[in-house]
């Protein structure tokens, strides 16, 4: 488990999700992050509209690849939104 997951007492699935996202998003990792997991919907925030479009285009592929990190599929849908400018 990562330090953040341990501090927040998050489940192993969320720790695996953090790692899976980092691996599967690759070089775009600096432009997008997992914001939430709402039931089976992964909520992703991006810093740019270009990153948002790229993730939207790759959404099905990313869901499929992330789910390979789990014994049974965790993610069914992905919502992508722009991060707040604050």
Image (cartoon, rainbow, N blue to C red):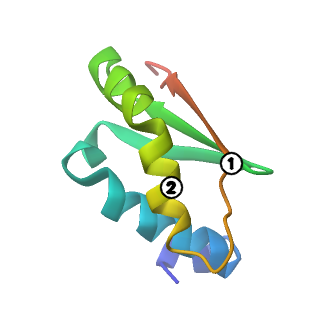
Q: Position of residue 36 (x, y in %)?
A: 65, 46
Of the image marks 1 and 2, the number of the one nearer the N terminus: 2
Is 36 rendered above or below residue 73? above
Q: Depth check: give the residue in front, 4 or 64.
A: 64
- As drawn, the residue found furthest toward the left would be 27
How many discs mark residues in the rendered view? Answer: 2
Q: CA distance from mark 1 to mark 2?
A: 9 Å
Q: Depth check: give the residue in front, 31 or 80.
A: 80
Residue linked to disc 2? 64
- Where disc 2 sits, the SS reads helix
Q: Position of residue 52 (x, y in %)?
A: 39, 24
Q: Say which residue appears at 48% left-offset and 25% top-offset.
A: 83
Indicate left or right for 10 with 34 as reference.
Answer: right
Q: Say which residue appears at 75% left-offset and 51% top-offset.
A: 40
- As drawn, the residue found furthest toward the right would be 39
Indicate left or right for 36 with 18 as reference.
Answer: right
Residue linked to disc 1? 76
| Category of crowding for the residue at label 2, using alpha-carbon neighbours closer than 10 angstroms: few (below 14), some (14–19), many (at least 20) | some
Write down the quadrant of residue 49 in the picture.
Answer: top left
Is 82 rendered above or below residue 79? above
Q: Position of residue 18 (x, y in %)?
A: 49, 64
- Where disc 1 sits, the SS reads loop
Does the residue at mark 1 contact the one at mark 2 (Cβ under 8 Å)? no
Q: Depth check: give the residue in front, 73 or 39.
A: 73
Q: Position of residue 59 (x, y in %)?
A: 47, 37
Indicate left or right for 37 with 35 as reference.
Answer: right
Q: Say which residue appears at 62% left-offset and 68% top-offset.
A: 14
Q: Say which residue appears at 25% left-offset and 42% top-offset.
A: 28
């Amino acid at each position: 488990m990562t330090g953040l997951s341990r501090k927040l007492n998050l489940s192993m699935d969320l720790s695996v999700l953090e790692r899976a996202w980092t691996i599967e998003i690759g070089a775009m990792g600096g432009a997008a992050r997992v914001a939430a997991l709402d039931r089976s919907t992964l909520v992703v925030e991006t810093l740019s509209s270009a990153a948002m479009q790229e993730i939207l285009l790759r959404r099905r592929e990313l869901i499929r690849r992330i789910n390979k990190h789990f014994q049974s599929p965790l993610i069914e849908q992905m919502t992508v939104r722009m991060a707040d400018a604050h």
